[in-house]
Image (tube, rainbow, N blue to C red):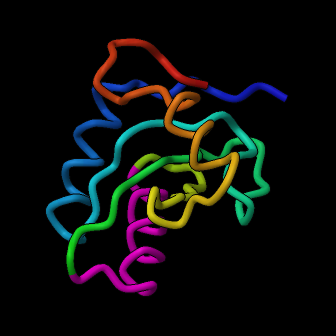
């Protein structure tokens, strides 16, 4: 299945919109399949830090709103929710959204 690449410049713009609306800081992109509740092949898995006041509804809203902006499903993993091996591996596996590459 062909998965169109994501333009990181466009993604950064949309992430800034989400960060202005919700108390969350998106750190980068995780390898596909990292987010347990996101099963779609075109999904985008992200790693983020929560800011004070973030609720579960806010997190869901951020996933939905960002997904609508980039026109593909989004799953967000919070650094504070990582345990064990994932807490060590996910930050190393993450691709920062500051780089100027395309992501599929």
Q: Which residue extends farthest left?
A: 20
In this rendering, would 89 be left or right of 24? Answer: right
**Residue in the image at 20% along x and 49% along y:** 16
Residue 101: quarter of image: top left
Query: Residue 95's x, y, as percent?
Result: 47, 26
The magenta stretch spans residue 58: yes
Q: Main secondary structure of the magenta part?
A: helix
Q: Which residue extends farthest front?
A: 84
Query: Residue 64's x, y, as percent?
Result: 47, 69
In this rendering, would 101 be left or right of 77? Answer: left
**Residue in the image at 60% along x and 55% along y:** 73
**Residue in the image at 19% along x and 69% along y:** 21
Give above or below for 43 relative to 53: above
Query: Residue 81's x, y, as percent?
Result: 53, 66
Magenta-colored span: 53-69
The magenta stretch spans residue 63: yes
Give above or below for 34 relative to 103: below
Q: Which residue extends farthest right?
A: 1
Give above or below for 81 relative to 34: below
Check the picture and name the quadrant holding the C terminus.
top right
**Residue in the image at 14% along x and 62% along y:** 20
Query: Residue 15's x, y, as percent?
Result: 29, 48
């Amino acid at each position: 299945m062909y998965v169109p690449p994501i333009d990181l410049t466009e993604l950064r713009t949309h992430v800034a919109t989400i960060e202005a609306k919700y108390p969350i800081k998106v750190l980068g992109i995780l390898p596909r399949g990292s987010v347990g509740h996101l099963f779609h092949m075109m999904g985008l898995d992200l790693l983020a830090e929560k800011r004070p006041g973030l609720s579960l509804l806010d997190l869901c809203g951020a996933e939905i709103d960002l997904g609508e902006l980039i026109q593909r499903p989004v799953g967000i993993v919070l650094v504070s929710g990582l345990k064990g091996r994932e807490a060590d591996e996910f930050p190393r596996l993450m691709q920062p959204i500051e780089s100027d590459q395309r992501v599929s």
